Amino acid sequence: MAKSISSSSQILINEGLQPNINHVNKEAKVDILDEEQGLKSGLTNSNQRQEKVEEVAKKVANLIDIIANDFGSKEEALKVDNIFAANQAKVKRENSQLSKDELKVKATDEVYDLFIQEEFVDGAISAYDKKGLDFADVEIRSEFDGLRKYDIHQKD
Amino acid sequence: MGADVKLYYDICNGKLSKSEKEKQKIALVQDAYNNEFDKIRVEAEYAGIQSPENLALIAQAMNSLINFIKVNQYLDISDNLKEKINSYADKVVIREGERVKPRDVEEEKDYLRGDLIEVAKDKKVEERFDGIRDQDIFEVALYALGVEKSEYDKREDKLDFIKVNYKKSLKQIQQIKDLDRREEAKQAITTVKSFLLDGSEFSPEIIKIA
């Protein structure tokens, strides 16, 4: 990034002299630091968000795999009820000591916690896309059948 | 829509056969929604954005509403029909009226996520009602509505039973003279209702009102 210098320093440089860096406007220095800090934190936030999107995508991809395996077709992942069912299967594998009811509750909570994440839709779009599916086709409620699809893809 | 809902209650209380009653209810809902449809059409015309496409989208929304009512068997639930019609009508009109009021991709994503969260909350409510989730808090919430757990367990129409008792509680709250206390009680009972019927999480207010 190009650093700004004071007009007096520019005059000294133009005249072949070395400017005293102490002459550099202190406020300008602070501005530069703030700007750099802002860009850094902006990048950090963006990276953190991307990491979360990838984390969600991984979880969703895992559920699609379970659905494809248990239901015989990856297209079954386009039904929300099957996402809940797949997560139940996953929880059952991970927590064999839990009762049937406890498994169901835990699995629902996990899916709920996944859905409420701000990055969920982006992660799901990515995971479905990698499996050759479009998350916009997901069937949420039977009464929504026949309505237009969610317009969730960025236009070029 | 108020008059339509009154008519709906009249039909419910009238002496009609089940199938006649259902037909009339569907016709009534269709009329009610047609009224909304007309209003939107006039607004769109006024704003200069009316188009056959918009109207087709809204008409499709209306059909979906009818489908929604059939699917959910709201034909036999009179208590919250108006609320359900309005909330669902809002939802489909917002969703289908995209061309009337365009939304961007991020809004669409939020909308999709909101619908998914609603489904997950419905599952939580089912699990509470099935007796496999939050049973201690559930009992306290029932108590806040003036319902004993043993009484609740005996009922077959559990969902309706809770809705009726929620409405009774609201009426009782209206009789509280102290405005601050009335407001506090209203907020608390709303929290109880959200916990029981909307799948929301436990809140300390439930204990407070109980």
Image: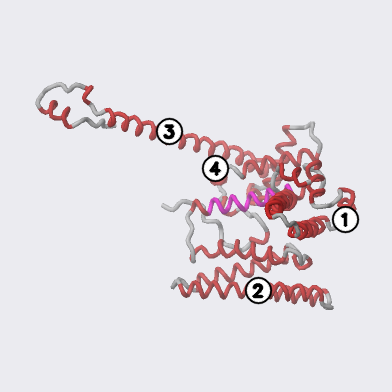
Residue A11 shows in the view: yes
> Residues at marks 4 and 2, common chain?
no
**Are both tags, 4 and 1, on one chain?**
no
The residues bearing labels 4 and 1 have C-alpha atoms spaced at a distance of 41 Å
Residue at mark 4: A119
Amino acid type indicated by mark 3 = Ser
Q: Label 1 sits on what residue type? A: Arg
For numbered disc 2, what is the local secondary structure? helix
Mark 4 residue element: loop
Q: Work out how far the residue at label 4 is from the one at label 3, CA to CA, in angstroms.
A: 19 Å
Chain of residue at mark 4: A
B168 in relation to B209, above or below: below
Whole-angstrom CA distance, mark 2 to mark 3, is: 53 Å
Q: Which mark is residue A41?
A: 3
Q: Which residue is mark 1?
A: B155
Q: Give the quarter of the figure containing the N terminus of chain B.
A: bottom right
Q: Which mark is residue A151?
A: none
Measured from the top left, where is residue B210 in percent x and y?
Answer: 79, 46
Residue at 89% x, 49% y: name it. B150
Mark 2 vs mark 1, CA separation in Å:
33 Å
Task: In this rendered view, identify the residue nearer to me: B52 or A48.
Answer: A48
Magenta-drawn segment: B108-124
Q: Is residue B122 visible?
A: no
Kindly identify which chain the residue marked by label 1 belongs to: B
**Residue marked by disc 2:** B32
How far across and down, in percent of the image, does residue B8 sit? 74, 73
Residues marked 4 and 3 touching at CB (< 8 Å): no
Asked whether B66 falls inside the magenta stretch, the response is no
Q: What's the amino acid at mark 4?
A: Glu
x then y, percent, for residue A30: 32, 30
Identify the chain of the residue marked 3, using the numbered disc in the image. Answer: A
